[in-house]
Every structure is written in structure tokens, then in C-alpha cells.
Image (spheres, coloured by chain):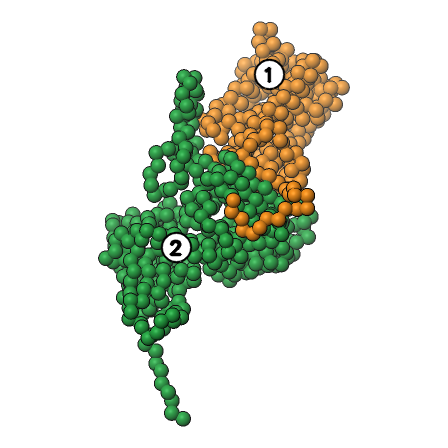
């Protein structure tokens, strides 16, 4: 097999600060510096892109000397924390923006899906938008006509196909938009985390379709996601980006494991901001910190029988009422161990503006030994979008500190099932 | 170099790539073939512009007529009656409406093209297609609008012929009108693209442009015939590439206008140069404007 995509020494530089305003004065200063024979005052490069440490330069590398190649017909997951350079890489591969240096060589047609429903016009009917969106994504008219029925069927919105999409529910909108994208004919498909929207059933359908795409038709798929179980399900290989550089490439499982491990490198707790998963600017509440009680600076090792007590620091900006807080646990393999919703436990979070601290204690489950990450969401209600949240934040490690010592090298599973009822029934 | 699997080279040791993305901006790589591949998108965008225009307004396509009609009425009152500016013996409504309809096309093309990056930032930031498609779709959708307005002009012309005893005396230059419209489109597109590229860096230019186009109208023989312009300004006005276009259309349709073949050659060359430089600048900016806008 040969490479479908080959990336060589790819770099992308962004200028920090208020881009787009005041550039005329910057340009004049630059020009003046040039006249006097001095060097460009704004070009101080040479720092990697770490958001938690304040850099001195106005310029950062979003990607720095990236090299990798992707084989034809494989599905590759691109993972990394926020700001690791995933989006920049996708933008360059989809030709939305140009790299600062380096080259990408591509074999075959490339279709990218950085967003569903790009160019949808609210006044247009579903059918008209299929054509418009399809054409924007690079399909020819007759190609779309040929596939129209299939697309409509896949979307499952047959009844509304001649209704303007402004009357659609957001779910229908996403279904229709993804249906168009799913029928693109290209050798390479790039998918950003667009499936985060839409209901679970449709998500499954899309993931299925993507699997079909890569396995059935021999297509190469690049998949970016925070959803590690989706990545491990779909992808054979993975690329882990961190601070604009390739940290690891290899099979998906090993890359995912590395992804979870990176948070634990020095046992010091990383900043929550690097794990924020929602960028809701108008959010009335912000999750500023999460830690295990008693371990404010480190990722602690807890005993299995200890009930981990999680403290969440909230900055409430506007009064919130009856919010539904969710805490999801993932193990080191990326498997979702379980989700705790505050509403299930009869807790409705209401808080007045100010700094608040929320306590959560995992009571009835005993987690098996290993590293754990948590995702926390503060949700407006049962199904609407989150106000704020973090994703896969490394929080603690569970150890078997010799409480369960019946035998060594035992198998664990995701949770430890103890206190079970055993009985030999007399026959 | 990290590789996921061993990269076996093809037989001759040289791999064939369909596309190479790099940061290098080759100045003359215009991707015209790519634009041709996306021609369906062009027609769909034109349709979108047209449909969305009448779907969102109460009066719908009537707006196409209202603006030039009332502008003509105002011009007749102010410049024709109050100021008493000559119209070369042509009935004032006909004289002004011809100028207004023509000027509208040029200024719409220019203004819409000049904001193309800003208006389409959300789409441009998410998906690749030849960016030039957008300005082209603006030129074409405005052409349709222009056609509708031209129809109105012809109706007014007929009305004058039948009810106002106007003797219709077109000249052979009427055959030049399609070419002059093309020149206008090219000028609007070219200027628009240059400005659009500059506005991605300097936002305040947008205001200057709206204002500038208004001023430019007065430097074009719209409300006066070139023949009525004072001698000392005449050569200056003739430098304005829109002047021969407007005068030529009037000469063809209404029989009066100052138009020479050398002026035609001048605007043709001017339009061509503007188009080429517009495309080059646009091509340069389109690759990375996403990062700055």
C-alpha cells in the first residue's frame, strides 16, 4: 500500500493578540523598523504553543515541523488536547488555510467536513439545500441528483424535504447536513468533531456510515474527536498531537493510552482550562477547577475502598437555577465507566453569583485499579447543551492498596464487583 | 520521519501526487480549471442570491424597480429642474435612468465584491472551493438584476416613443452595449477584488469604499453629459474608465454621447489590467485570509 497523505515539515504560525485590528499601525511600525534597518519588531518566534505558560512573543507555532504519512484505505484518529493543533492541521489539509512552511502531498480527491451544513440557507427547502451544500462540498449537480434519493433516505427527513430548513429542528438540520456529506465521493474524507451534535441514534448511524466508508470503499478517513471510544471503535491508527507537535503515531489503542497518560506525567495536576470542551461565551457559570479533596495540586493515588470526593470550583456569573451536573468517569483505555447525573440523585444546582464550591462523592461503585479521567458538564436541563464543561480531565488513580488480596495477577474489568451474594444451593 | 506503515514507493521510485499543499504562493497560479469544475456551484449561488432576495422581502422583485425609478425621479427634480443641468436634448427621465441603471450595476458589483471575504468568512473558514467563485457569482446575479432594470428602461423608452412623441434614434453603437456591459462587470469585479483583498487587513477601508463609490458617481457623466462638462475638467473625467462606458451606451441607445474608438481601447485595456491585478491580489489573499479576518 502507498501513502494517501504525506506531510513533511509542516508548520503554521499564528500571530497572537488582537488580530485584524491595529494592523495598519503594526505594518507602519514594521515598515519604520525596516527603514531604519532593524529587524521586524513583531516576529519573535521560537516558542511552542503552550497556553498555560505565558509566552513572550506575539507569534506562536500552532504546528511545528510535523511529519507523518497516512496509508491509503486506513482510518486514522487525530487526537490531542485543546490547542494541540488538531484544528489547524485539519484546516490545512482541507485547504481552508495555507501552511506557513512545509508541504502536504495528497493522492486522490479530498473532501472535508469541518462543519455540517456549511452554506445552508434558511429560506431554502431541504432539497434545495442538499444541492447547494453538495456543490459547496465539491459535488457536481448531476452527481447530487443521482444520489438525491439516497441522501434524503439517509437523513430520515423525507416528510420535510420541501420545507424551508429554518423550520427544521436542530436535529433534523444536522441529519440532513450530514447525509449530504456522507455521500461525497472522494478517496479521502476528513471529519472534524461534527458528530457531537445530533441524537445518539443518528450518531451511531453516522459512525456506522464512516466505518463503511473506510472499510467498504477503501477510503482513507481522518477523524478528529474527543470521543475516545469513537476513535477506538473506528480508527486503526492514531496520531497524538501535543503543543503543535506529533507526540506519537501508531495503532489507535496505544495512541489513546498515551493520550490518557500524558496528564499524569509529573503527577502535578494540569490546568482545567486545557480540557475545556465547551466554548460557550455567554455561559452564566464557569468551572474553574476540579480536584480530589485533600489533593489540591497533584493527581492522587487512592485506595479502591476510598470513595473519591471530587471538589468543583465554580465561578457563577449570573444566578443559575436547577442545573444538571454530570460527572463521567473514563478508564485508561478510554472506556466510559459510568455517568453520574445530579438530577438522578435529586440534586438540582441553584447558585447565586460568586465563587462556589460543589462536592461530589462516588458512593456505591468501586473502581478497578488504574488511571481515571473525568468529564464534567454543567447542563441547563436534561438534553440541551452544556453551559460549561471539561473533557477527559486526569483526576486520580485507583490502587489496590492490599485490601483485595485474595490472589495476584487477577483480572479486574472496569469496576470491582464486590459484596456479591454467593450461595451453594442444596440439591 | 514518523510513518504509520512502511511507505513503499511505486515502481519507478517516484510517487505521483494529485495535489500538493504548501505555503508558497505562486503568483500566477490561478486555478482556472478548478473554477470550471465548480461551475455548478456558481449557478446555485446565483440562484440562492436571487431566491433569497425575493423570499425575504415583502415587495419581492419589485425592489429591482423601485430604487432606479425613484432615483431617476429625484434626479429629474434636483439636477434637471432645480439645477437645470443639460441633458443634451434627451428627455430627462430617459437620460438619468440610463445612467442610473448602468451605474447601479457597476457599483453593486464593486461594493458586493469588496466585502466578499467578510460576508463569506464563515463558509470560507470551513470548506475549500475556488474563492473566485464567490465574486463571479456576485457579478452574474447582479447581471440578472441589471437585465430586469434594463427591461424597465426599455419600457420607459417605449412609453416616451408612443406617448411623448419622442423620436427614437439609436445609432449603430447600440451593438456595442453588450461589450460595454462586460467592461463594466470586469471593472466592478477587478476593483472589488483589489479592495476585498485590502479590507481583510484594513477594515476601515470598507467605509472609504462606500463613500468613494458615491463620489465616483459624480466624476462619471451620470447626471450630466460629458459634452456639458467644462473643458478643463473634461480630460480629467475622460480618464475615469466608466465615462466612455456610460457615454457609449447613451450614444447607442439615445443617439447622443461623446464616444471615440480610442476611448474604447483605453477602457478595454484599463479593465483588462484591473481584472488581472485583481485576480492576482485576490489569489494571494485567499490562501490565508482565514487567519486574519
Farthest-out residue, right = B172
A114 vs B81: above or below: below
Q: Residue at x 60, y 19 (%)?
A: B222
Q: Residue at x 60, y 6 (%)?
A: B231
Q: Nearer the viewer, mark 1 or mark 2?
A: 2
Which residue lies at the image location 44% right of the left edge and 36% below the top edge? A14
| Mark 2 secondary-structure assignment | helix
Give the residue at the far top of this rendering: B232
Query: Mark 1 falls within which chain?
Result: B
Residue B5: percent from the left, percent from the top? Answer: 56, 52
Q: Name the residue under label 1.
A: B240
User: Does residue A216 show up?
Assistant: yes
* Chain letter tied to green: A
Q: In which quarter of the image is residue A39?
A: top left
Q: Which chain comes out orange in the rendered image?
A: B
Instruction: Indicate whether B80 appears above or below A65.
Output: above
- The residue lying toward the viewer, choosing from A258 and B195, is A258
Image position, residue B286 (x, y; %): 55, 33
Label 1 residue SS = loop
Horizontal side of residue B83 vs A64, given as left or right: right
| Location of residue A303 in the rendering, given as x and y in whole percent from the top left corner | 29, 65
* Front-lying residue, B2 or A69: B2
Question: Relative to the observer, which residue lies in front, B217 or A426?
Answer: A426
Q: Residue A261 carries which label?
A: 2
Kindly report the distance in space between the C-alpha atoms of the residues bearing marks 1 and 2: 68 Å
Residue B106 visible to the viewer: no
Q: How crowded is mark 2: few (under 14 residues within 10 Å), some or many (20 or more)?
A: some
Q: Residue at x 56, y 20 (%)?
A: B217
Amino acid at each position: 500500500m502507498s501513502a494517501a497523505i504525506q506531510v513533511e515539515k509542516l508548520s503554521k504560525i499564528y500571530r497572537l493578540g488582537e488580530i485584524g485590528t491595529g494592523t495598519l499601525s503594526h505594518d507602519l511600525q514594521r515598515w519604520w523598523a525596516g527603514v531604519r534597518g532593524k529587524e521586524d519588531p513583531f516576529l519573535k518566534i521560537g516558542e511552542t504553543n503552550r497556553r498555560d505558560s505565558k509566552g513572550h512573543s506575539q507569534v506562536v507555532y500552532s504546528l511545528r515541523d510535523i511529519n507523518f504519512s497516512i496509508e491509503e484505505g486506513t482510518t486514522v484518529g487525530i487526537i490531542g488536547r485543546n490547542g494541540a493543533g488538531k484544528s489547524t492541521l485539519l484546516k490545512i489539509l482541507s485547504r481552508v488555510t495555507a501552511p506557513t512552511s512545509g508541504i502536504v502531498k495528497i493522492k486522490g480527491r479530498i473532501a472535508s467536513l469541518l462543519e455540517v451544513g456549511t452554506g445552508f440557507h434558511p429560506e431554502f427547502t431541504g432539497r434545495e439545500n442538499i444541492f447547494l451544500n453538495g456543490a459547496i462540498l465539491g459535488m457536481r449537480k448531476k452527481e447530487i441528483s443521482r444520489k438525491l434519493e439516497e441522501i434524503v433516505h439517509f437523513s430520515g427527513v423525507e416528510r420535510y424535504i420541501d420545507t424551508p430548513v429554518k423550520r427544521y429542528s436542530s436535529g433534523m438540520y444536522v441529519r440532513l447536513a450530514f447525509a449530504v456529506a456522507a455521500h461525497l465521493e472522494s478517496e479521502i474524507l476528513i471529519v472534524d468533531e461534527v458528530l457531537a451534535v445530533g441524537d445518539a441514534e443518528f450518531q451511531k448511524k453516522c459512525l456506522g456510515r464512516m466505518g463503511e466508508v473506510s472499510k467498504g470503499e477503501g477510503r482513507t478517513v481522518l477523524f478528529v474527536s474527543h470521543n475516545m471510544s469513537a476513535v477506538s471503535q473506528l480508527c486503526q491508527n492514531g496520531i497524538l498531537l501535543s503543543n503543535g507537535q506529533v507526540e506519537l503515531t501508531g495503532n489507535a489503542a496505544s495512541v489513546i493510552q498515551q493520550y490518557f497518560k500524558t496528564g499524569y506525567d509529573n503527577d502535578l495536576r494540569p490546568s482545567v482550562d486545557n480540557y475545556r470542551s465547551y466554548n460557550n461565551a455567554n455561559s452564566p457559570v464557569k468551572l474553574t477547577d476540579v480536584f480530589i479533596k485533600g489533593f489540591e495540586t497533584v493527581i492522587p493515588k487512592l485506595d479502591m475502598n476510598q470513595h473519591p470526593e471530587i471538589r468543583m470550583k465554580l465561578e457563577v456569573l449570573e444566578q443559575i437555577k436547577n442545573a444538571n451536573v454530570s460527572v463521567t468517569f473514563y478508564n485508561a483505555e478510554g472506556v466510559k465507566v459510568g455517568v453520574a447525573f445530579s438530577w438522578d440523585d435529586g440534586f438540582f444546582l441553584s447558585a447565586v453569583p460568586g465563587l462556589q464550591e460543589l462536592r461530589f462523592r462516588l458512593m456505591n461503585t468501586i473502581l478497578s485499579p488504574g488511571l481515571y479521567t473525568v468529564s464534567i458538564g454543567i447542563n441547563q436541563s436534561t438534553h440541551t447543551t452544556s453551559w460549561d464543561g471539561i473533557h477527559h480531565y486526569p483526576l486520580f488513580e485507583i490502587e489496590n492498596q492490599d485490601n483485595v488480596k485474595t490472589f495476584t495477577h487477577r483480572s479486574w474489568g472496569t469496576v470491582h464487583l464486590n459484596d456479591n451474594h454467593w450461595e451453594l444451593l442444596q440439591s | 520521519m514518523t510513518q504509520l506503515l512502511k511507505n513503499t514507493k511505486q515502481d519507478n521510485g517516484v510517487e505521483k501526487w494529485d495535489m500538493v499543499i504548501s505555503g508558497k504562493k505562486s503568483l500566477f497560479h490561478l486555478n482556472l480549471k478548478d473554477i470550471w469544475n465548480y461551475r455548478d456551484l456558481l449557478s446555485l449561488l446565483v440562484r440562492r442570491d436571487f431566491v433569497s432576495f425575493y423570499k425575504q422581502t415583502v415587495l419581492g422583485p419589485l425592489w429591482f424597480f423601485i430604487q432606479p425609478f425613484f432615483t431617476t425621479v429625484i434626479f429629474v427634480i434636483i439636477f434637471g429642474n432645480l439645477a437645470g443641468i443639460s441633458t443634451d436634448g434627451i428627455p430627462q427621465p430617459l437620460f438619468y435612468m440610463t445612467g442610473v441603471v448602468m451605474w447601479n450595476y457597476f457599483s453593486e458589483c464593486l461594493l458586493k465584491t469588496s466585502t466578499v471575504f467578510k460576508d463569506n468568512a464563515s463558509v470560507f473558514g470551513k470548506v475549500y472551493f475556488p474563492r473566485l467563485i464567490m465574486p463571479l457569482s456576485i457579478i452574474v446575479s447582479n447581471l440578472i438584476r441589471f437585465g430586469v432594470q434594463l427591461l424597465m428602461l426599455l419600457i420607459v423608452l417605449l412609453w416616451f416613443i408612443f406617448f411623448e412623441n419622442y423620436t427614437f434614434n439609436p445609432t449603430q453603437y447600440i451593438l456595442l452595449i453588450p461589450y460595454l456591459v462586460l467592461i463594466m462587470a470586469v471593472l466592478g469585479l477587478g476593483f472589488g477584488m483589489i479592495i476585498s483583498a485590502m479590507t481583510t487587513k484594513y477594515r476601515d477601508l470598507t467605509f472609504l469604499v462606500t463613500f468613494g463609490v458615491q463620489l465616483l458617481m459624480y466624476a462619471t457623466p451620470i447626471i450630466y453629459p460629458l459634452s456639458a462638462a467644462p473643458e478643463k475638467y473634461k480630460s480629467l473625467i475622460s480618464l475615469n474608465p466608466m465615462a466612455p462606458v456610460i457615454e457609449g451606451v447613451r450614444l447607442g441607445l439615445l443617439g447622443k454621447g461623446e464616444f471615440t474608438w480610442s476611448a474604447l481601447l483605453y477602457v478595454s485595456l484599463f479593465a483588462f489590467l484591473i481584472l488581472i491585478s485583481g485576480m492576482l491580489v485576490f489569489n494571494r489573499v485567499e490562501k490565508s485570509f482565514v487567519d486574519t479576518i
